[in-house]
Structures are given as structure tokens and as C-alpha cells.
């Protein structure tokens, strides 16, 4: 027969074991499995969990473990030359939440690098998540509750603060990032949700992204001096009312890399259903160079268009170059997209265009509004030149996949012909078209060899 004393002993043991388990759970939470982390990453050399205080890293190398959050009111400061490597088994991601800031200021001689934790020679696309900045700037999504960012992050973005400031990233490289929480919900190289115009994003390279290089969900942040190299999906992806401006960006597609979702230099939608939600997605782009594989034998079937504007989107593209894409240059999709272009709500002027087929194209819905031949006539009347051969644009070595040179040669049509009439003061007025004129702004900080770099 079980005595009362025996029962009490069993209950006491149960309470003790339960309390030990709870302590272990709490300790795990505090060390980064979702709870606040009290540890000093300058001591541990690890970023993990959630930070509810400012963190200033010392120069050095750090490991990113799992999803790492900086909450509203905090700032993460990263000095020049710092390397942040993700723990590959936990697929890390750095998330700067609404109201938080990142201050990552590298230099041309000492960039900040976010990369895979694998050794040189073994790194792969999708080794880790990527960097996510979330802000309070407007989107065209419902405001209450604000939308959740993609990628299984479970954090919201967007608001009504036009000048919202998520901090600064300058002279930074993001390599081998991009994971999917589920189909259609991915973390990209740099994901920007509702990021405001008070934020500074300049001199950023995304290489070997397993999804998009830059994806912008609403917001109005401006960017300059961007490099997209060897992306799997889209290089510049605009959604949900993004209205910012970009100047000086270069895209180079490696021919052997494309995911199943059809990679494009630009993919843009007003929203997933092509509604008239306001504000319309309408990026303003100038001095961009998009380089496709130009018929390389290794070209993947899913490599697509230089510019794919679809689902009721608006746009402005000026003083830019597109060349070597296998399925088309400028592609308009949906009647609403085509109507905005016909009425000059969307603008395509003073560009240099080459494509292996269909430099200008429409889908069935857009074709009911404007034909491809009408698009060509319209853009050429507005200062654009269409080329049958990519070599006529005269860039130095745009199709060298391992050591590209995007600079224009002497006599290149890219050296002249830019026109900034009607554009605002964000854009530096230059004579050249495309991302480069007399100066190569990638020198010193950009790397096309992230597989072999000894981090």
C-alpha cells in the first residue's frame, strides 16, 4: 500500500525536476533561443537571441546564431572591417525591428562583411538567412495590424512616418544568404520592409543570394552604389507601394544560376493581385546597368528579363543600360501597367537597350493596351537607343563572370546622353548612362570571389 509519505516524496521529486526543467528553459531563452540575451557579444563573439539594449561591437569576427533581433529603441553599431559569419546549422538572420537602428559603416578599404560560416571552398547559396531592416514608413498594405515581413520572422513593418530612420549601411557585403521559411516567403540578401527615407543605404554588394538580392516591401528609402552579383531570383524586387529612388547600381547574372521562380534584373508589383492600392509601387531608377548572360552556353532556362514590370506597377527608368538578357529587355505585364506607361505615369527615357530577343515585350493583357512596337517607338522618341548587338554598347568586360569590368570604353555611347530633366536633387546629374562613368566606385570593397575569401 502506498503511504502518504511516499506520495509526498514523489510530489517533491516532481516539483524539483519540473523546476530544473524550467530553469533550463529560461537559461536557454536568455542565451538566445528567443528570449532577451544579457550576454556581451564582445566577450562571447556571438550574436544570438533578442537584444533590448544598444550593442556596440568591437572590431573582429562574430558568429550569428539563429534569428537575432534588435528591438525598438536599440542600436547595433558595427565598425569597419567587422566580419559576421552565420552559424550554418541554425541559418542565422539579423533583424532590425521597427524603431531600432543599425549603424554599419565600413570603408572602401575596410568593408563590413556578412557571410556564410562555412570554410572557403564549401560555401553555398542559402547557407544563412540575410539582413532584414524593418521601418515605420508607408506601404500600401492595411495599417492595422501592420503586415508581417516574409521569411518566418514574425515581425511587423510599415506605418506613417515618411522620414523614418532605420540607420545606416555603407560599404557592406552580404554573401551566400537567402532561405525560404515556406514557398513564397523568403529572406533575401537584404530585405527592407517599410524602410523610410531617413535611412542611408550606400555601397552595398549582395552576392550569391539564394533568393532576391534586394527586396523592398513598401517604404521610400533611397539607395546609391549597389552591386548585385550571381543572384538566384530577382536582383531588385519592388512590392507593396515602394516609392524610393536608386542611382548607380550594377546587376550581373551568372549564366549557370537561376532558381525556379524565373530570375529578373527587376521584378515589380503593386501587390500580389495587381490591385489599385495606394501608394502605387513606383521606384525611380537612374544609372543602372543590368548584365544578362548574353547567350552563354550555361544559361539556365529560368533566366528571364532585364526589367519585368507587372501587376499594376508604375516606374521611372532613366539613363540606364540593359544588355544580354535571354528573354527580353523591358517587359510590361497587365493592362494597368501598360496604361500607366502609355499615359506617361511611367517613364523610360535615355536608356541603352539590348536583348537577345524581344528588347520590348508585352503579355496578353498589356498587349491589349500597347504593342511592343509602340513601346519601342515611344522610348526611342524619348532618347533611348536599341541595339542588335551587346558589343555596340562598348563596355570593357561585362560578360566576364569571375572578374567583370563594367566600365565604358573610349567612344562608348554610355559616356554621354544622360538627361535628368524633372528629376529631384537626390540624383547626381552626370553625363554618362549606366552605373559607371570615369570612376570605378567598386574599387577596394567589392569582391567577386566570396567562395575563396579567407574569413
Image (cartoon, rainbow, N blue to C red):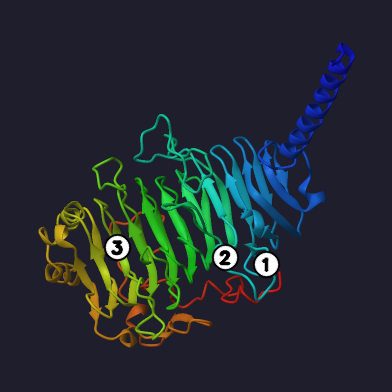
Q: Position of residue 234 (x, y in %)?
A: 40, 63
38 left or right, relative to 331: right
Of all residues shown, which one is farthest toward the left?
368
* Circle nearer the N terminus (3, 1): 1
Mark 1, secondary structure of its residue? loop
386 versus 184 height, above or below: below
Q: Position of residue 449 (x, y in %)?
A: 60, 77
Of all residues shown, which one is farthest toward the front?
1
- The Cα atoms of the two marked residues, 3 and 1, are separated by 34 Å
In front here: 268 or 166?
Answer: 268
Nearer the viewer's eye, disc 3 or disc 2?
2
Which labelled disc corresponds to residue 176? 2
Kindly identify which residue carries mark 1: 118
In front here: 448 or 288?
Answer: 448
Image quadrant where residue 54 sits: top right
Dot 2, how many residues are within 10 Å of its Cα: few (below 14), some (14-19), or many (20+)?
A: many
Dot 3, how many residues are within 10 Å of its Cα: few (below 14), some (14-19), or many (20+)?
A: many
Kindly identify which residue carries mark 3: 308
Amino acid at each position: 500500500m502506498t503511504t502518504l509519505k511516499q506520495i509526498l516524496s514523489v510530489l517533491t521529486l516532481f516539483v524539483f525536476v519540473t523546476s530544473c526543467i524550467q530553469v533550463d528553459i529560461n537559461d536557454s531563452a536568455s542565451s538566445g533561443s528567443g528570449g532577451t540575451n544579457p550576454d556581451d557579444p564582445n566577450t562571447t563573439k556571438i550574436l544570438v537571441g533578442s537584444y533590448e539594449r544598444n550593442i556596440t561591437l568591437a572590431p573582429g569576427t562574430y558568429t550569428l546564431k539563429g534569428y537575432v533581433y534588435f528591438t525598438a529603441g536599440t542600436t547595433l553599431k558595427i565598425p569597419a572591417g567587422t566580419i559576421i559569419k552565420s552559424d550554418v546549422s541554425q541559418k542565422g538572420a539579423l533583424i532590425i525591428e521597427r524603431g531600432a537602428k543599425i549603424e554599419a559603416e565600413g570603408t572602401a578599404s575596410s568593408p563590413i562583411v556578412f557571410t556564410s560560416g562555412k570554410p572557403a571552398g564549401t560555401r553555398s547559396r542559402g547557407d544563412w538567412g540575410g539582413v532584414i531592416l524593418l521601418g515605420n514608413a508607408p506601404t500600401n498594405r492595411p495599417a492595422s495590424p501592420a503586415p508581417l515581413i516574409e521569411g518566418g520572422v514574425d515581425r511587423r513593418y510599415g506605418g506613417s512616418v515618411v522620414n523614418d530612420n532605420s540607420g545606416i549601411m555603407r560599404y557592406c557585403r552580404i554573401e551566400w544568404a537567402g532561405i525560404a521559411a515556406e514557398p513564397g516567403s523568403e529572406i533575401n540578401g537584404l530585405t527592407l520592409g517599410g524602410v523610410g527615407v531617413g535611412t542611408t543605404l550606400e555601397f552595398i554588394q549582395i552576392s550569391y543570394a539564394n533568393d532576391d538580392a534586394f527586396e523592398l516591401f513598401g517604404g521610400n528609402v533611397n539607395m546609391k552604389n549597389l552591386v548585385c552579383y550571381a543572384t538566384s531570383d530577382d536582383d531588385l524586387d519592388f512590392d507593396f507601394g515602394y516609392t524610393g529612388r536608386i542611382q548607380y547600381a550594377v546587376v550581373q547574372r551568372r549564366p549557370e544560376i537561376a532558381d525556379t521562380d524565373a530570375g529578373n534584373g527587376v521584378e515589380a508589383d503593386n501587390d500580389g493581385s495587381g490591385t489599385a492600392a495606394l501608394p502605387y509601387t513606383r521606384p525611380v531608377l537612374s544609372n543602372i546597368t543590368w548584365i544578362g548572360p548574353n547567350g552563354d552556353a550555361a544559361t539556365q532556362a529560368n533566366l528571364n528579363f532585364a526589367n519585368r514590370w507587372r501587376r499594376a506597377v508604375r516606374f521611372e527608368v532613366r539613363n540606364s543600360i540593359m544588355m544580354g538578357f535571354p528573354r527580353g529587355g523591358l517587359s510590361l505585364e497587365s493592362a494597368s501597367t501598360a496604361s500607366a506607361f502609355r499615359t506617361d505615369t511611367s517613364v523610360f527615357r535615355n536608356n541603352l537597350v539590348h536583348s537577345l530577343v524581344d528588347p520590348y515585350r508585352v503579355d496578353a493583357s498589356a498587349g491589349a493596351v500597347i504593342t511592343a512596337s509602340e513601346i519601342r517607338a515611344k522610348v526611342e522618341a524619348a532618347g533611348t537607343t536599341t541595339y542588335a548587338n551587346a558589343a555596340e554598347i562598348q563596355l570593357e568586360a561585362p560578360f566576364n563572370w569571375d572578374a567583370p569590368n563594367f566600365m565604358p570604353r573610349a567612344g562608348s555611347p554610355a559616356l554621354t546622353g544622360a538627361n535628368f530633366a524633372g528629376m529631384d536633387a537626390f540624383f547626381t546629374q552626370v553625363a554618362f548612362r549606366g552605373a559607371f562613368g570615369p570612376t570605378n566606385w567598386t574599387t577596394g570593397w567589392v569582391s567577386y570571389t566570396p567562395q575563396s575569401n579567407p574569413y
